[in-house]
Amino acid sequence: MTEGISEGEFVKSWNKVIRFLISAETAWKGHRDLMEKSGGTENISTYKAQIMAGLIFNRS
């Protein structure tokens, strides 16, 4: 039989997810604005790879 996590741990984990999503959205908006100003095109695949790398390496 497995034990569940405590409510405090659950809340802490979800707070990390929410903070990450907010920072990812902010970063995407900044990236998009920069690309529009420089006349470049958005490379969504590269951006998604950066997001995944952030998920993997920023587990603090």
Image (cartoon, grey):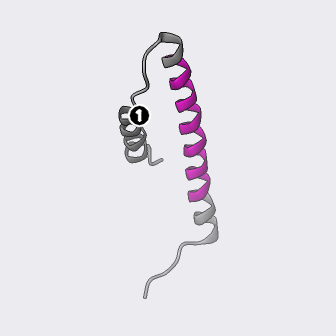
Q: Residue at x 53, y 12 (%)?
A: 37
Is 2 on the left or on the right of 25, as rendered? left
* Rendered location of residue 30, percent (x, y): 56, 24
- Residue 46 vertical placement versus 4 (above, below): above
Q: Residue at x 49, y 81 (%)?
A: 3
Q: Quadrant of the N terminus?
A: bottom left
Q: Quadrant of residue 7?
A: bottom right
Q: Amino acid at mark 1?
A: Ile
User: Disc 1 marks which residue?
Assistant: 44
* Rendered location of residue 34, percent (x, y): 52, 17
Task: Name the foreground residue: 57 vs 47.
Answer: 47
- Residue 3 vertical placement versus 13 (above, below): below
Q: Examine the structure image and report whether residue 23 is included in the region drawn in magenta.
A: yes
- Residue 1 vertical placement versus 27 (above, below): below
Q: How many marks?
A: 1
Is 10 on the left or on the right of 48, as rendered? right
Q: Quadrant of residue 53?
A: top left
Is 27 on the left or on the right of 52, as rendered? right
The chief SS type of the magenta part is helix
Residue projecting furthest to the bottom:
1
Local secondary structure at mark 1: helix
Task: Name the foreground residue: 2 vs 51.
Answer: 51
* Rendered location of residue 28, percent (x, y): 53, 32
Is 33 on the left or on the right of 44, as rendered? right
* Rendered location of residue 59, percent (x, y): 44, 48
Q: Which residues lie in the magenta part?
A: 13-34
Q: Residue at x 57, y 29 (%)?
A: 29
